[in-house]
Amino acid sequence: MKENVILEKSYKFAVRIINLYLYLKDKKEFELGNQILRSGTSIGSNVEEAIGGYSRKDFSAKLGIAYREARETSFRLRLLHDTGFIDSKLFNSLFEDCEEILKILGSIQKTLKTSNS
């Protein structure tokens, strides 16, 4: 089976987000923890759905949702860092992964738009 970079990266990122959620739960931070759990794991879910999409339009729409979820996750990571819930080392590692996913998703969307023109 051919390797799918965005599928693999979004899955590994979701695993890291689940671990972050468990860490935040231990710190009694439930609201932001729940929110980042939803948005951070939704990225990979939508990538998976896009790959199984029944049309090019469906594929593009699901990737668009994944991109927006990644933006939301990026925002929540900044909030968690700037409010002291996560340290700089953890933040930088997660934020870099999230930014890489955003770049890949953005590039795929740009390619789709170009090929549709």
Image (tube, rainbow, N blue to C red):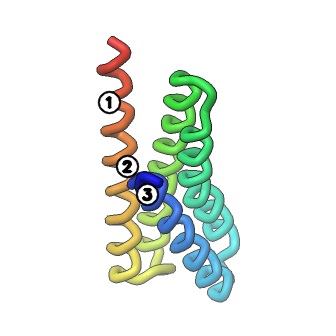
Q: Which residue lies under the disc numbered 3?
A: 74
Residue at the image point whose x is 37% and y is 64% from the top: 97
Q: Where is 114 relative to 78, above or below? A: above
Kind of residue at disc 2: Leu
Q: Nearer the viewer, residue 83 or 19?
A: 19
Residue at the image point whose x is 42% and y is 52% from the top: 2
User: In whole angstroms, how far apart are the C-alphas of marks 1 and 3?
Assistant: 20 Å
CB-based contact (under 8 Å), mark 3 and mark 2: yes
The mark nearer the N terminus, 1 or 2, is: 2
Kind of residue at disc 3: Ser
Q: Where is 29 relative to 58, above or below? A: below
Label 3: state its secondary structure. Answer: helix
Please tell me how crowded label 2 is: few (under 14), some (14-19), or many (20+) other residues with Cα within 10 Å: many
Q: Which mark is residue 75?
A: none
Q: Nearer the viewer, residue 70 or 25?
A: 70
Q: Which residue lies under the disc numbered 2?
A: 102
Q: Quadrant of the C terminus?
A: top left
Label 1: state its secondary structure. Answer: helix
User: In whole angstroms, how far apart are the C-alphas of marks 1 and 2?
Assistant: 12 Å
Residue at the image point whose x is 54% and y is 46% from the top: 47
Name the image quarter holding residue 112: top left
